[in-house]
Amino acid sequence: MKSHCGFVALLGAPNAGKSTLMNALVGSKISIVTHKVQTTRTRFIGIALHENSQMIFVDTPGIFEPKKRLERAMVSAAWAGASDADVIVVLVDAERRIDDNSRRIIDGLKEAGRKAILAINKIDVIRRDSLLSLVSELNEMGDFSEVMLISALKGDGLDDLKKIITKSLPQGPWLYPEDQMTDITERMLAAEVTREKFFLRLHQELPYAATIETESWQEKKDGSVRIEQIIYVERETQKAIVIGKAGRSLKEIGKMARMELEEMFDRRVHLFIFVKVRKNWSDDKERYQNMGLDWVE
């Protein structure tokens, strides 16, 4: 049987469920999931197999109307992921229906002459008649090769989505080993896990004013690993919020991150997190390189 392999871009408005979907398709957590929008900042690759096909999923940042440099870089990364992909899946949140960001994506694909698979997510939370009207409305707006009804969280419809995707993949050898699930390094994955806990702990006070980097990774003789990370914020007042009264916020972030990293890596983790002020870090080219984003003027 001939093998197939290709890149699949997951496009959608912020918080449409792209990261949840990719984690479900890959079968492992490789992208952070929070209730806050725009938490995916760069392109992550997740690798899944279906019969003789290897699907390389690209979890792109959500597409929205950017205002700041970081936002422009995130949206640019999303469109770059789509332009390079063999297959595009547009994810629409059934509960939110069609917003301006979804329209922007559909119009952008039409202008580029690209067909896409439409995946309507969270179908378990809306009535059937409302769902059917949404399908009809979206079909009138865009040029979709297929329309799939799914629940990324519950796994409904994902096997059928995989089948549809693999039909469109080009013939060719697999690009990654059979057991590889992502191209993200352990250092980057550790930073992403901590960033997720940061969002969950401080989503109201500091939604986007921080970036997290793994500065040190030391393998210990007993099989454990010592990880040192830095949370960069832009002002001293933000640093105080991250640390919290008597250091409680930072301790909670570290505890949650360490527990998940130990489960993820199946080993003991010694996690040390420091907070530093770096004014205007979102205008620092080096930070963009560390996040895997292109510098956008």
Image (cartoon, rainbow, N blue to C red):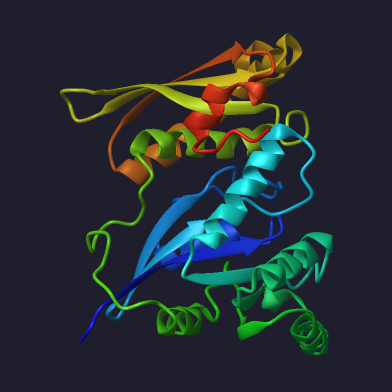
Residue located at (29% from left, 43% from top):
266
Tally the marks: 0
Residue 12 x, y percent position in the rendering: 66, 62
Which residue is at a point 56% across and 21% down the rendered structure image?
Answer: 231
Toward which corner of the image does residue 110 lie, by quadrant? Answer: bottom right
**Residue 28 in sight from this viewpoint:** no
Return the residue nearer the eye: 177 or 72: 72
Residue at the image point whose x is 27% and y is 74% from the top:
172
Observer-nearest residue: 194 or 59? 59
Q: Position of residue 92 (x, y in %)?
A: 70, 70
Judge from the rendering whether residue 253 lies leftward or rightward of residue 69; answer left or right: left
Give x and y (percent) for residue 148.
60, 83
Question: Quarter of the image holding residue 226?
Answer: top left
* Picture residue at 63% right of the left edge, 44% below the top: 74
User: Which quadrant of the rendered structure holds the N terminus?
Assistant: bottom left
Residue sitting farthest toward the left: 221
193 above or below 153? above
> In this view of the protein, which residue sits in the foreground, 218 or 87?
87
Give 259 or 214, whichever is nearer the viewer.
214
For the C terminus, the image quarter is top right
Q: Is residue 46 shown to the viewer in this render?
A: yes
Vertical position of residue 18 compared to residue 265: above or below: below
In the picture provided, is 156 more to the left or to the right than 63?
Answer: left
Location of residue 282 in the rendering, given as x and y in whole percent from the top left corner: 66, 25
